[in-house]
Amino acid sequence: MKVGLFVTCLVDLVRPNIGFAALKLLEDAGCTVVVPDSQTCCGQPGYNSGARDIAKVLARKVLAEFRDCDYVVAPSGSCSGQMKVHAVEDLFKGEPEEAEFRSLAAKWFELSDFLVNVLKISAVPNAPAAIGALTYHDSCSGLRELGIKSQPRMLLSAAGATIHEMTDCEKCCGFGGTFSIKLGDISTRMAENKCVNIAASGARVLVGGDLGCLLNIEGRLRRNGDMQTKVYHFAEVMAGMTEA
Amino acid sequence: MQVKSMHFKATSSAKLNDAVLQTALKRAKGKFVDGRAAAVAEIDAWEDIRTHAAALRDRVIANLDAYLIEFEQNAVARGAVVHWAETAEQANAIIVKIAQDNAVKIATKSKSMVSEEIALNDAMEAVGIEVVETDLGEYILQLAHEPPSHIVAPAVHKSKEEVADLFVAAHGRPRLTDIPAMTREAREVLRSKFLGADMGISGANFVIAETGTTLTVTNEGNADLVTTVPRIHCVVTGIEKVIPTLEDFATLIRLLPRSATGQSAANYLTLTTGVKAPDELDGPEQMHVVLIDAGRTKLVGSDMKEMLRCIRCGACMNHCPVYQNVGGHAYGWVYPGPMGSVLTPTYVGIENAGDLPNAATFCGECEVVCPVKIPLPDLMRKWRERQFDQALRPFGERFSISVWNAFATRPALYAASTRIAARVASWWGGKERRITWLPGLDGWTDGRDMPAPAGKTFRELYSARQKLAARHKP
Amino acid sequence: MSARENILARIRAQSGRTGATATAAELAAVRRHIAQQMRGPLPSIASDPPLARFIGECERLKSTVDEVAHINDVPQALARYLKQNSLEVPVVGWPSLSVLDWSGAGIDYQNRLANADDLVGVTDCFCAIGETGTLLLLSSPVTPKLHALLPETHVCIVSRSRIVATMEDAFALLRNERGQLPRSTFLVSGPSRTADIEQTIVIGAHGPYRVHVILTP
């Protein structure tokens, strides 16, 4: 089973550790993973900025790069949503290429969803014991476009984590891609609200499935002077790679 | 209403620091969000009803001319006079004429958002007719000379202390801060207005084609006093409010109060059909219905036609994290939140409301709670597409997207430049691994650090790893 | 071109249809659809026994409910209610109820239009809706709406036999028995209320403060 890893532009540039953690989880689960070298971006920043043609160009590039894989897995709800939902229901809807993008969408999965619902893993082999207390932030695209909710929680719990759910765990953190810069004051307030809820949960570790959200929240924590609360991607925690 | 949407960015930043507003927004969020959730949980067929409601609204919008003609015919048959207005100016002229023809000195009014669009009160007052808002929230705002900040709870941004001050100034009675007592005072003060009005102006939550009926969905009883006591009743409504049958109303009314306030039923559903018969003791002698376009026809048949399904429940803004943090006034016109971000550019021009469709992270909460399944994030994105195509966003934004694309479509260039960027940014972040300022990205760094990148890209690390593994293969 | 013509023409143009206004065929299609009176999906609560549901919803809405075994017991039941609420005042009511023995119960029942000074208004109703605890009142020369709107207390005599399950059932009954809607079809679900000041719910806004239902057979 050939699994293509879509690393995502943010992971590639900012936190490659997440990419390697995803790789480890997939390989430990028995997958043969390929990482197409020419991959860059799924096109969502352009798409959400109204640059439709640009978004289509990048989507076609992704299609070409991953066409031969049996599955495509990404450690991100928003990139996965872009390829599974927006490419099919909007960008190429009614066009000759729709069928091809539908095929790609059918075999594209966000990481935790792939582990639980395709590989049917209920516990990750080699998961580090005693992950401890954590709180989980549900990224909007993953949650509302792809139904990612119980999957990461199930695997984290099976690996011994105690999840202290925060108030409004499903509330947007304020990242929203370019929104975080265009309307930075509002974005910062939304991140601040999330930080308050994290602190109130009692957990000192935040875990999530999208690096954009995590950078946004971590950025606010540190600006607030909180250097203690750890911020990890789900993949890093499950692969035991949080000390990188 | 005067358009202030072009100031969204500055106004919203100021609103973030408005302590009274922030307290009010926090309170409202709890009540509206939790209220809706509990009310929806009681309806096991909720999703099916939403689907049916969206379809019935779509059917009407797709045949809007025929349904409006059917409504008009049935309303006229029952003694109503139906007027059509293309613009705010035409609508106001019609209503002023009705008032002047009938020697109206004072008009009572129940809440109507379309009347805010056309600035009806100003037009009436300009010719010396007193207009009294009777919905408690709108009455408070009339005293404060402020526009509404929410379509269902217009004075949601006001504290009871602020209301107390307004009442003292307007009523001349001792200051009260007990909410039931203040409500009682408003009732007493407005009673004489209700009873002495020559004309009652109401909106219409829906108009029913089958019966020629206009209807209001309210809780206070003010809409009923406004539409029963005066000798003239004037309904102002957008043309998109028409629905086919009484059954369709029964379907929609299962969704509306639960979505809006978490109520299982709104207190008063009042279906008004025609004028009073000669032997009736109460009711208006004249019934006028003013059907207003004011930009709605732009949406008919367009790629944003779903917006016309809107039943004005307010659920989208109640759940929107942006609205929850900045409130309604920042949006600068009649309609705030997600529905306002779609309608405001439509009705006042995208060049006057450019930030509104961008005031979203596309989190999708609005779409989830919309009782008629309007794809609000998609519609806001369509506005962004128009802005991109028409070069209406700041140059820097457009340029960045083009630059990003130029790199992202050229893997070798991308690989090389991201390697450099990762190193530079990592170095920039110093020992503490934090970047506190990035050129051109103040929007982020004003309020947050950027955690420093690791320093090497995944691509280069993976490539190196693969080379090493190849070298060590037996 | 009038505003009406312009608006209709614009709707048609936007919808990709030719012509200035709806054709006879299009109007006929609309009428056929309307005539179907299609109901939407119903929730399970619509199947709850209407009487029990009605009483439960009234309580949730803060309407009070009393029951009598016979319509002639209504005046005594109302007298008890008025005494309990310190409302021993004249009541203004609809003609249809004036035939009951009010004076025997010590109630001054005035059969005239309600005014701003009346404290208690007495009506019956066309029917009631179990699903939402709603009273459906129809206006007419002998059933004016002001009785249910102006006084602070609205007393409504509801026959149990006239409680239907859903609003759809109520509209069907209305079409069946009356043919068309009257000028005002007034659906009342509890005493008036507002939450416009700090989202705090206050019972009693511009309409009645109290709705008291007396159920008869």
Image (cartoon, helix red, strand yellow):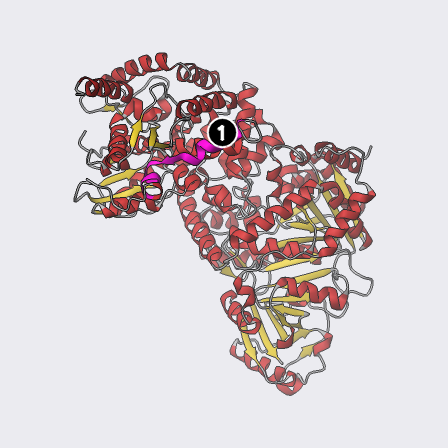
Task: Please state which of residues C159 and B405 is positioned toward the viewer in this rendering.
Answer: B405
Residue for point 66% across, 50% down: B206
SS class of the residue under badge 1? helix
Q: Left or right? Give the position of B402 relative to A149.
A: right
Q: Residue at x 61, y 43 (%)?
A: B309
Q: Which residue is mark 1?
A: A100
Front residue of B331/B54: it is B54
Q: Is residue C29 left or right of residue B122?
A: right
Q: Residue at the far front: name it.
A: B474
Q: What percent of the width, then of the height, locates residue A140?
A: 40, 38
Name the side, left or right, on which B290 lies relative to B256: right
Q: Position of residue A209 (x, y in %)?
A: 32, 36
Q: Position of residue B408 (x, y in %)?
A: 40, 18
Q: Is residue C179 above or below residue B81?
A: below
Does any portion of residue A97 appear in the rendered image? yes
> Which residue lies most toward the bottom here?
C104
Amino acid type, residue under disc 1 in the picture? Glu
Work out whether residue B194 can be spotted. Answer: no
Q: Quadrant of the C terminus of chain A?
A: top left
Give the answer, above or below, for where B372 lies relative to C80. above
Please report, as a chain letter, where disc 1 is located.
Answer: A
Magenta-colored span: A97-116
Q: Within the magenta stretch, is there residue A109? A: yes
Residue C98 vs A58, above or below: the answer is: below
Question: Where residue B122 sits: x, y (%)?
Answer: 66, 38
Give the residue displayed 73% in from the left and 36% down from the top: C11
